[in-house]
Image (tube, rainbow, N blue to C red):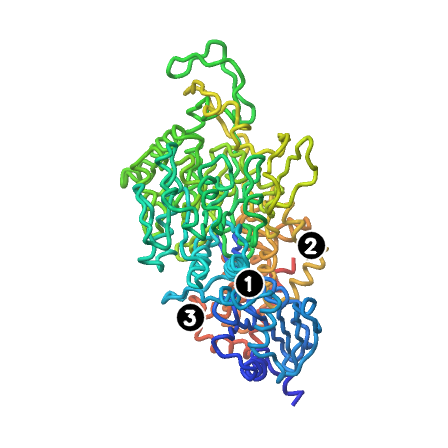
Amino acid sequence: MQEDKKKLSEEDICLRYLTPALEGAGWDKAQIRRSYTLTAGRVIVRGKLQTRGEKKFADYVLFHKHGQPLAVVEAKDNAHSVGSGMQQALGYAEMLDVPFVFSSNGDRFLFHDATAAALGGIMEEEIALDRFPSPDFLFDRWRRFKGLDARTERIVTQDYHTDLSAKVPRYYQMQAINRAVEAAASGQDRILLVMATGTGKTFVAFQIIWRLWKSGLKKRILFLADRNILVDQTRTNDFKPFGKVMTKIAGRKVDKSYEVYLSLYQAVTGTEEEQNIYKEFSPDFFDLIVVDECHRGSANEAKAWHEILDYFSAATQIGLTATPKETKDVSNLAYFGEPVFTYSLKQGIEDGFLAPYKVVRIDFDKDLEGWRPEAGKLDKHGVEIEDRVYNQRDFDRTLVLEKRTRLVAEKVTRFLKESGDRLAKTIVFCDDIDHAERMRQELVNLNADLAAKNPKYVMRITGDNDEGKKELDNFIDPEVRYPVIATTSKLMSTGVDAQTCKLIVLDQRIQSMTDFKQIIGRGTRIREDHDKLWFTIMDFKKATELFADPNFDGDPVQIYFPPESGPIVPPDVADGPPVGVGEDPSHLSDPSHPSHSDPSDPAHHPRQKYVVDDVRVSVVAERVQYYGADGKLITESLKDYTKKRVKTRYASLDSFLKTWTGADRKRAIIEELEQQGVFFEALADEVGKEVEPFDLVCHVAFGAPPLTRRERAENVKKRHYWERFGEQARAVLGVLLEKYAVEGIENIEDPSVLNVKPLSDFGTPVEIVKLFGGKDGFDTAIRELEHEIYSA
């Protein structure tokens, strides 16, 4: 029997041994989730093509109830030891935030109990198949580990909202929801969730509110945002199940008969006391307030946001943000405390839930060198230009070089044309409204053919323009084609759910990490049904230098400036004094703050804006940068980067050749290198279009001269190696060799190629294989053909 078990596959082990063991312990089918998907598989971009990396699956995830996982079980076939899957399972358990982990090969289970240190017992032990713990046993242990009493248990086990859509929260969303609910149930009154743009913060907020409301812990809830579109999107989408108990505060009218309120903070506050209608509610009216995009001011004591939160200070307050703001004046961490959960952009891209990006960096001569007007120089309106050196911080703020604007528009237009998708949704971020309007005009002129077909092809969408704002919903709707290109300044930098945006253009000087992350977030959503798996950033003002900042995607860090007479060690964020007390080291301050704004910014020092139409602007440097497998932007040359990546796997050319020659599927080696971040199509653009991955690796990593596919095919023909085959078999090999020369090695390795003309003219796949004496003879002939191709 033992010998038979060793012949079983992993799937057979699950079906015959593990599932019966779980069901025998009392786990019902609703609690057992087989092949539970954790990640979507990282998007790998090769030139204009994209593919998915491997998804992560847990063999079993055991749930107490929907959305509340308790344990992970990892299975291996019987050729492995009982504990061989444990380390893999521990990784999955960390993702799911569960303490109980099991590994099995069908003989026994290895049980890892993370609660043992707190509750006593053995952390790891082997148990028999028929001794698997029951649901009640694990839940009771989890409950005691969490320290739940009867009241808090009722709250944290409150059901998620489910409907006919059967939307299942992703693993990180479950973590965020469960941790926030547990924090609120335990009495924590300030809660912060940090989740990258595009990871479903509003859905998370809805489930948190739903469960706290249904459990009876919270009876009246206020959802607060600072953009009307955020409120409207929330009301009609994720919050729709609240139905008749929900209202939006509008028209400065208060109706106290609802339970869930959505509001712009501007709708309940104002400069005059009578405009502060939030005071028509008693301070204890709301017992839960959720602040969306809380980095935008809720933790700033000088903001109207803070007045509202302070007025309703008795309520539990939950902040949601992709970018915690930490400056000398504003600290989300000091106000809300350390985040109970963080999910970063880097992790979202690695998991395949967020889109990776390429960066096209373009530098202009005047941006790098500056420009000084000759004495007495007049602008196009006859105004004499102040004599000084103007540089990038001035352009489009105090000095307009019209030819620079035109050159940006030309580059954007050229990119869209060369990409083959002129209808790709595009956002152009400009320095101000005037800049956005000038950019719109240039783009209309350069795309006159499409603008003539539909005047909404290019639109300015800014806060001052009603026509543009009315089209914002159409721009973000994946099913509506127009507008295609939106020029903007600030309006679309946050909270705009532009799911199909494929191009982000940065012609705005961005110094704030918070602003930068928010703007990049406009492109990070994935919509596979609209062929949106990655996006491109075109950077004209060095904004992407912020990618090199170690804080770009790290955990949020509190900034503390110690006062002269105070402690130098920062206080605990939960109960310390306000952050920002004391002298502000300028290198740590937030450049976006008014006290550190650009002195040439008209908002700081109102001054004349000069417009110059006769100064030539040219491109100094243009390069493409890629988001690498390690989550960092590749800033070195693509060849140097590739050489390093290849040599981490193959120390020498001999090592690579040995692996390549011995591989039954060459495609598997190519896919492995792609997983490690090798961009073959981009390399081919540099080395030569007809050079395939094999020669790219040999040439770029090891200095071997590259041969094109056609050269390799012609070399094979000269050797006459196939003369021992029959006439028709030789003809088949000749067709396969030609397919290699035109399309690459994948066609030789794919058996389905035998169904495609002209090979199908030789007969059915079975008949073709018989020309070689059967399947073994055909496989041998293919291996020999590959050997001949790569023998040079």
Q: Which residue is mark 2?
A: 648
Residue in the picture at 49% in, 9% down: 375
* In the image, residue 444 above or below residue 348: above
In front: mark 3 or mark 2?
2
Q: Secondary structure at mark 3?
A: helix
Residue at 50%, 75% (x, y): give it.
31
Residue 303 has which mark?
Answer: none
Q: Earlier in the sequence, mark 3 or mark 1?
A: 1
Q: Quadrant of the N terminus?
A: bottom right
Number of other residues with Cα within 10 Å of mark 3, as a class: few under 14, some 14 to 19, many 20 or more: few
Look at the image and tell me whether residue 417 can be seen: no
Mark 3 — residue? 761
* Quarter of the figure with residue 439: top left
Q: What residue sits right under mark 1 in the picture?
A: 54
The amino acid pointed to by label 2 is Thr
Q: Earlier in the sequence, mark 3 or mark 2?
A: 2
Ranked by sequence position, the earlier of labels 1 and 2 is: 1
Q: CA distance from mark 3 to mark 1?
A: 37 Å
